Image (tube, helix red, strand yellow):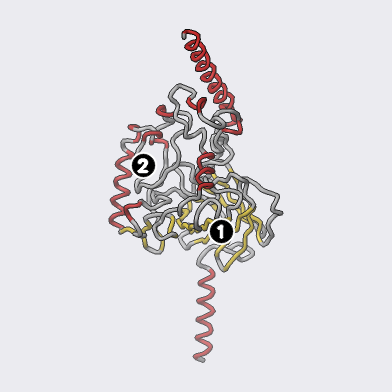
Amino acid sequence: MRLTTITAALLLFGASSLAEVPRTPWGTPDLSGFYDSATLTPLERPEELGDKQFMSREEADALIKRVRENRDQANAATVGDREAPPLGGEEGPRTGGGGGTGGYNNFWLDYGDDVVEIDGKVRTSIIYDPPNGRQPEMTPAGQKKRAENFTSFTYVNDGTPSWLDAEGPGPFDGPESLALAERCLLGFSAGPPSIPGVYNSFKRIIQTEDHVMILLEMVHDARIIRLNSEHAPDEMRTWLGDAIGWWEGDTLVVETTNFHTYTGLYGGDENLHLIERFTRMQDGNLLYNFTVTDPTAWTAPWSGEYVWKHSENKVYEYACHEGNYAMGNILRGARLLENEELARRAASAGEE
């Protein structure tokens, strides 16, 4: 009788465990839905924090309060000149092509309203490996690739064609010389891997028995993950890479390879190998874990983890600059500056 009772209890425990998260008709955790990945926690830990992986809830609340107070003064600074993210760390390039003109102020930015908390502990950075919470040192090739990703974005517009006397191609020589994000091919935080950005951090997941689709608001990309499949031939390479997935218990594991020579992870290249893990939590949120390996870009692998919060909001279209109408004006403006400068030099030489 006692054995029967214990067996029944174990069966009930197993049934209860399976019911902890919603499941699909075919039995896997149901990841489908909308998520907001915005967070005040930076990708990289500020150097002054060293190996301090966690902060107290009191420290986190003070940080959140400071951010909210700063938002009350949102119109006081432009994107190009605004303060660094709340915990410091790297935020990416300045607004491209605008130099001191900026683009729009803090009113339009959305870093989220909270920090990353996992198992009751508040993280000081998304990256947890290496232990200092920062990306490993980049190789010279990775540094060069990263700079190439932002060639036109990092140009500071001082009203002159300052690139004329520089060696090599100029940042506005043609459409292909403009930054990937400026061309709306790959954008900022979209990755993969997906990391928090300054806005447009929503995701939508739709899954079937043999596919998972992740729609990224930034910049309108849709990742198609084939389940229980094999990678495409090595010569077939795409901007988002070739993603295949499988279930390990209740965690969806995704391996992505076959990237283009330029990737959405700035500095990464065609050798980028990415492992991601998606775990649905009991509160409806999604635990997102990733490991980046790219020996030609970074001197060691690195890993991060943070929470995508379930949301009732929808993902609306982010059209970037629709139809790329601005492309012609960017290039025409560069030619005008070059012609004006060459005419000025010619006139100056004639006077001599």
Quarter-of-image position of residue 230? bottom right
Q: Earlier in the sequence, mark 2 or mark 1?
A: 2
Tag shown at residue 275: 1
Say whether marks 2 and 1 touch (CB < 8 Å): no
Judging from the image, what secondary structure is the residue with disc 2 in?
A: loop
Q: Residue furthest top?
A: 351
Depicted 100 relative to depicted 186: above or below: above
From the viewer's perspective, is 173 left or right of 113? right
Depicted 78 relative to depicted 144: above or below: above
Q: Amino acid at mark 1?
A: Ile
From mark 2 to mark 1, how far is it between C-alphas?
29 Å
Residue 94 visible (yes or no): yes
Q: Position of residue 319 (x, y in %)?
A: 56, 35
Tag shown at residue 324: none
Residue drawn at x 32%, y 43% is 68
Residue drawn at x 45%, y 54% is 136
Query: Which of these two is toward me, 23 or 92?
Result: 92
Residue 36 visible (yes or no): no
Residue drawn at x 32%, y 58% is 55
Q: Amino acid at mark 2?
A: Ala
Depicted 345 relative to depicted 252: above or below: above
**For the residue carrying disc 1, how many other residues have a C-alpha within 10 Å: few (<14), some (14-19), or many (20+)?**
some
Q: Position of residue 257 (x, y in %)?
A: 62, 54
Depicted 221 relative to depicted 15: above or below: above
Q: Position of residue 91 (x, y in %)?
A: 42, 43
Tag shown at residue 84: 2
Quarter-of-image position of residue 226? bottom right
